[in-house]
Amino acid sequence: MFLALLAVAALLAVLVARLPRGGGRAFAAGGAVLALAGAALTRLRGGGLPGHGPRRWHNPS
């Protein structure tokens, strides 16, 4: 899933570079940002980044 989101972000970045100014370019840029954010959240959730592992539940007793 992480690599798929990175591929989508790269594809949209290329699309932004090729499109003329206008609404389509803005949508492509927004999609690239969302894909990168999704990729980062996927990594964080899986504990793939240093210092960001899955939460450990603490028993209060």
Image (spheres, rainbow, N blue to C red):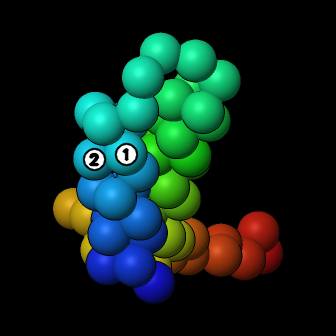
Residue 23 placement: quadrant:
top right
x and y percentages locating residue 10 in the rendered image: 29, 56
Q: Which residue is mark 2?
A: 14
* Number of numbered labels in the structure image: 2
Inspect the image, locate mark 1, and give the three-letter code of the amino acid beneath it: Leu
In this orientation, which residue lies closer to the viewer: 60 or 9? 9
* Direction from residue 52 to residue 22 in the image, left or right: right
Q: Residue at x 72, y 77 (%)?
A: 59
Q: Are marks 1 and 2 in contact (CB under 8 Å)?
A: yes
Residue depicted at x 32% and y 69%: 7
Q: Which residue occupies the extreme top position in the image? A: 21
Q: Which residue is mark 1?
A: 15
Quadrant where the C terminus sits is: bottom right
Using the numbered discs, state the Cα–Cα distance from disc 1 to disc 2 in whole angstroms.
Answer: 4 Å
Q: Amino acid at mark 2?
A: Val
Residue 36 screen position, x and y as percent:
42, 51
Please report the residue visible at 45 percent of the width from the left and 84 percent of the height from the top.
Answer: 1
Question: Which one is nearer the viewer's eye here, 60 or 16?
Answer: 16
